[in-house]
Amino acid sequence: QVQVVESGGGLVQPGGSLNLSCAVSGGTFSSYTMTWHRQTSGKERELVAMITTDGEITQYLGSVKGRFTISRDNIKNTLYLQMNNLKPEDTAVYYCLAVGYRVNYWGQGTQVTVSS
């Protein structure tokens, strides 16, 4: 059974940084395209960043380009999202998604709050 567990969220002031982690167990992490999504109350979940299995290709939501960096460690079976220069509009629950062959695996989410 594949488990996806996010961590690293919290409260940070505008302009601050956070580094989210997503640990994947029970599956073949290196075979999954990995993505970060976020969702705020009353809105649909949106794709924030994506990284291919080998880490060679990354893509970002326009509003986070240049501020967020997605990366992965296929030895530690862990996905990361380094978030810099955070803004209040980045406040959301952040979710990690492992994209498998015929099934996807979501984590439970971690809350990120950007506020002074």
Image: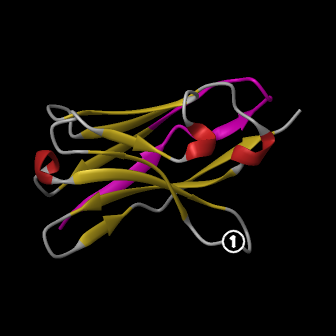
Highlighted range, magenta = 1-20
The residue positioned 33% from the left and 39% from the top of the image is: 58
x, y percentage for residue 36?
Answer: 44, 51
Specify the quadrant that holds the N terminus.
bottom left
In this orientation, which residue lies closer to the viewer: 88 or 21? 88
x, y percentage for residue 8?
Answer: 53, 37
Q: Within 10 Å of the Cα at label 1, are there few (<14), some (14-19), or many (20+) other Cα atoms?
A: few
Q: Is residue 35 left or right of residue 108?
A: left
Q: Secondary structure at mark 1?
A: loop
Magenta span has 4?
yes
Tell me the kind of residue under disc 1.
Lys
Name the residue beneath numbered marker 1. Answer: 43
Magenta span has 10?
yes
The residue positioned 21% from the left and 40% from the top of the image is: 77
Specify the quadrant that holds the C terminus.
top right
Q: Is residue 109 left or right of residue 31?
A: right
Name of the residue lying farthest toward the right: 116
Q: Quadrant for residue 15, please give it.
A: top right
The residue positioned 10% from the left and 52% from the top of the image is: 28
**10 relative to 61, above or below:** above
**74 relative to 100, above or below:** above
Q: Quadrant for residue 66, please give it.
A: top right
Colouring convention used in this rendered image of the protein: secondary structure
**107 relative to 81, above or below:** below
x, y percentage for residue 63?
Answer: 63, 43
